[in-house]
Image: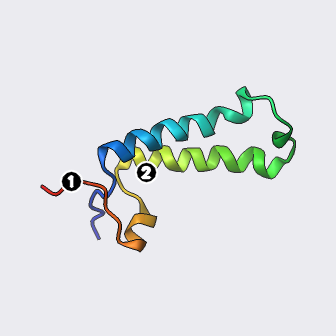
Amino acid sequence: MLKTANVGNIDRVIRLVIGVVLLASPWFIQSQVWQNAFVFWLVPIVGAVLIATALFRFCPLYRLVGANTCKAK
């Protein structure tokens, strides 16, 4: 099954920016939130998933709900 792109350009940029912020936040932002090990690792993992979906232009969740932000060719 080929995975066709379903993440548009604006969506990609937003995902990349938020993903980078989430990926780096436990190490660069001082907060009591990071004392919880689950949160400390969950936030960067979510960031990595956002970055991956932006780079591959495919979001499995979009496929499940039938969403597509790509412009028709």
Figure check: 12 above or below 29 = below
Among the two numbered marks 2 and 1 on one chain, the one whose residue lies closer to the N terminus: 2
Residue furthest to the top: 28
Rounded to the nearest angstrom, the CA distance separating label 2 from label 1 is 17 Å
Task: Indicate left or right for 61 with 28 as reference.
Answer: left
Quadrant of image for the C terminus: bottom left
Figure check: 28 above or below 15 = above
Residue at 59% x, 35% y is 21
Residue at 73% x, 30% y is 27
Q: Are marks 2 and 1 in contact (CB under 8 Å)?
A: no
Q: Identify residue for label 2.
A: 53
Q: Residue 31, how many percent across, how many down?
A: 82, 34
Which quadrant of the view contains residue 5?
bottom left
Label 2 SS: helix
Q: Identify residue for label 1.
A: 71
Label 1 SS: loop
Residue at 42% x, 73% y is 64
Task: Indicate left or right for 68 with 13 as reference.
Answer: left
Label 2 amino acid? Thr
